[in-house]
Amino acid sequence: MRLVVAVDCSTTAAKAVVHDQDGHVVASASRPLRTTQPVAAWHEQDATHWWTATRAAVAEAVGELDDPGRVAALCLTHQRETFVCLDAQGQPLRPAVLWLDGRAHEEIAELGSARVHELSGKPPDTTPALYKLAWLSRHEPVVLEQAARVGDVQAYLCLRLTGRWATSHASADTLGLLDLQRGAWSPELLALAGVRHDQLPALVPAGDVLASLTPEVARELGLPGPVPLVAGIGDGQAAGLALGATAPGVAYLNLGTSMVLGVHSDTYLWDPAFRTLAGMTAQGYTLETVLNAAAYVATWCREELGGASGTDLEDLAAAVPAGAEGLLTVPYWNAAQTPHWDPLARGATVGWHGRHTRGHLYRSVLEGVGFELRLHLERLERATGRPVEQIRAVGGGARSTLWVQILSDITQRPVRVCSAGEVSAAGAAALAWQHLVAAGAIASGRVTPEPEGHDVLPDQGLAPVYDALYAVHQQIYPGLRGVFADLAAAAAVRPVPPSAQG
């Protein structure tokens, strides 16, 4: 039986997972990655650590195999929107800028437009690299002028693994520089970002071969012969592929630090209700909604509310009636994304009275994320005309029985909680198997198993309670939008130093 190695180079670690054709994990290893914040709102990594962590993780996983010669392909998935600038020798000119980096708010306000959204599929937002590249062109122009290469995580690892400067459309897309309908770099977007076409990697369809590992790298990884590197996709789409979200009516939900919901679309659509990405396969597109503080807010509550453990707060919240007795939380701790796309928005809790406790607040946070999920689903369905009939959930938040039930009750939709594991890596493995089937290297077979899990069904009796509160929840952000902008301006005011007084 042949094997494939899936590598997930995420924000926190490089993980190597070896899969057999039945979808079983036969070996795995991981190496941590460190993020630095030299300035508030900046998030950076040393790109050379992507390589050293990936190399060590793959070598360890391959070393666990009884016969490394069974490895037939390697495929990558990775953190999206992150980019690195390299010199002619492939060395980083500065630390890589990550997807969650928030330095480019002025560029977003100035350059973000309906035209950029239409071309790239991305509403003006903090995540696309376009605006951070524009920031570099203004604040560190020498870096972009001297850079021989500018690319995503997969492009960098492909260069180190194979010597070729290339990536997939689905990996390059999240830089925000791709004309998504044409599947080609956009001269108009490159001009806005201050990037040259010759700096960018070659584009290869997802599932095709980028190149073969060099003999030297294969030896370092413990592989006895040449192995093809199959073009992978970003971690969100890879998770969606593993969860079967290419099927009509199925959405993937990653309830992690952020909450990301995605569906497949055969046609190109762009709308503020979602961000449009390259597809989970080489055909079609992925439509995603994003709340960038989901489990982040729940963790904040656990850490800040009197030192209560997560289990204690969960138990307290479970004892509180649905609706938290009129306490509503808008969970915009890290700005608002879908559908408002407002970097100045902040969290708000409305409706406090004397009966409320920590348990009420914690439940209102969990419910607030649920109301945002309902808002995302309804806007998505309205824009596409296609219903979402089942949600398939993964991520740390999906381990909370209470939270998943709340999501199902508020949206009145079934939620399948899928088994824990490296879901993005499973999507990369599926791409590798699809390539091997297409190439005739293995017989066709079930290379993308139906995800295991259990279904959580909505309590229909709670629909009237949550319908009434959802109507109120929808009024909070529009009512506070101007307040958020005024608050940001007020917070920027600095005191007058004593020497200037009088």
Image: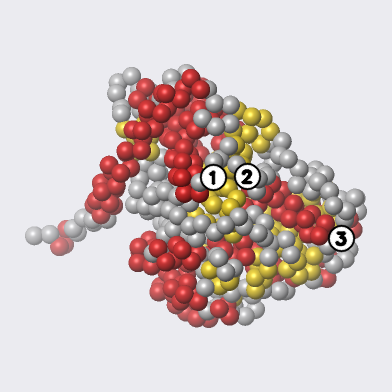
Q: Is residue 454 left or right of residue 44?
A: right
Q: Which of the 4 quarters of the picture holds residue 358?
A: top left
Percent x, y of residue 46: 58, 63
Marks 3 and 2 in Cβ contact (< 8 Å): no
Mark number for residue 248?
A: 2
Rounded to the nearest angstrom, the CA distance separating label 3 from label 2 is 28 Å
Residue most extreme to the front: 385
Rounded to the nearest angstrom, the CA distance separating label 1 from label 3 is 36 Å
Mark number for residue 192?
A: none
Which amino acid type is shown beneath numbered disc 1? Arg
Q: Is residue 222 above or below residue 344?
A: below
Q: Is residue 354 left or right of residue 72?
A: left
Residue at x 58%, y 52% (from the top left corner): 265
Foreground: disc 1 or disc 3: 1
Percent x, y of residue 435: 78, 59
Q: Is residue 135 above or below residue 435?
A: below
Percent x, y of residue 19: 80, 49
Rendered-image quadrant of the C terminus: bottom left
Residue at numbered disc 1: 386
Q: Which of the 4 quarters of the picture holds residue 51?
A: bottom right
Is residue 210 among what the camera can see?
yes
Q: Nearer the N terminus, badge 3 or badge 2?
A: 2
Q: Nearer the viewer, residue 87 or 168?
A: 168
Q: Is residue 477 left or right of residue 160?
A: left
Which amino acid type is shown beneath numbered disc 2? Pro
